[in-house]
Image: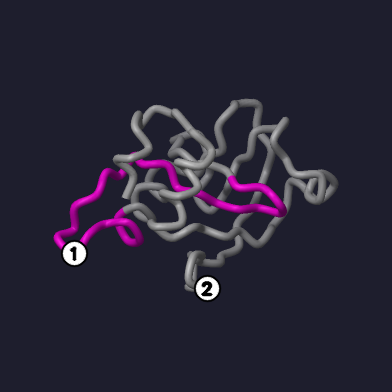
């Protein structure tokens, strides 16, 4: 789904659509698989519910898992859709996925306090 793009990001393409909920989300099973593949340590230990951080257009989003989102789809909160994507959604778009170190920094910087609690636990 994602390939290494740079020191801090992976690049992929997903179907992106707006949604009425406040959090960005992908299918829960996709979310857990990406968490496990990219964020697990050498012993394979990782919290599979940590938010992923994805950049679409000009905006970074903490992304949670949601069973109601179709596989291969990133659902963005309607009010958070970047202006540069407003007239192109729904549709396919390049999506940048922050690696574990970059994601941890972005979560701390934004002060995101979602269901997973302390952003310092994110790694």
Q: Earlier in the sequence, mark 2 or mark 1?
A: 2
- Left or right: 100 with respect to 63? left
Can you give x and y, in whole percent of width and height, for residue 63 in the image? 50, 42
Q: Which region shows up in magenta?
A: 36-60
Disc 1 residue crowd, few under 14, some 14–19, many 20+, Cα 10 Å: few
Residue toward you, 60 or 23: 60
Compute the Cα span from label 2 to label 1: 21 Å
Q: Residue furthest front?
A: 109
Residue occupying the point 45% across, 50% down: 105
Image height check: is 66 above or below 72?
above
The secondary element bearing badge 2 is classed as loop
Task: Say if the magenta span includes residue 40.
Answer: yes
Image height check: is 114 above or below 52?
above
Q: Which residue is mark 2?
A: 6
Can you give x and y, in whole percent of width and height, for residue 35 in the image? 35, 52
Residue occupying the point 39% across, 27% down: 115
Q: Which residue is mark 1?
A: 42
Disc 2 residue crowd, few under 14, some 14–19, many 20+, Cα 10 Å: few
């Amino acid at each position: 789904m994602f390939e290494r793009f740079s020191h801090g990001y992976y690049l992929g393409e997903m179907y992106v659509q707006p949604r009425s909920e406040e959090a960005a989300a992908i299918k829960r099973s996709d979310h857990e698989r990406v968490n496990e593949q990219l964020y697990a340590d050498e012993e394979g230990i990782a919290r599979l519910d940590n938010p992923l951080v994805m950049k679409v257009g000009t905006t970074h989003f903490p992304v949670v898992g949601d069973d109601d989102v179709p596989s291969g789809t990133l659902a963005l909160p309607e009010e958070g859709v970047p202006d540069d994507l407003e007239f192109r959604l729904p549709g396919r778009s390049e999506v940048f996925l922050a690696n574990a170190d970059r994601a941890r920094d972005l979560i701390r910087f934004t002060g995101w306090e979602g269901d997973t609690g302390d952003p310092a636990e994110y790694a």
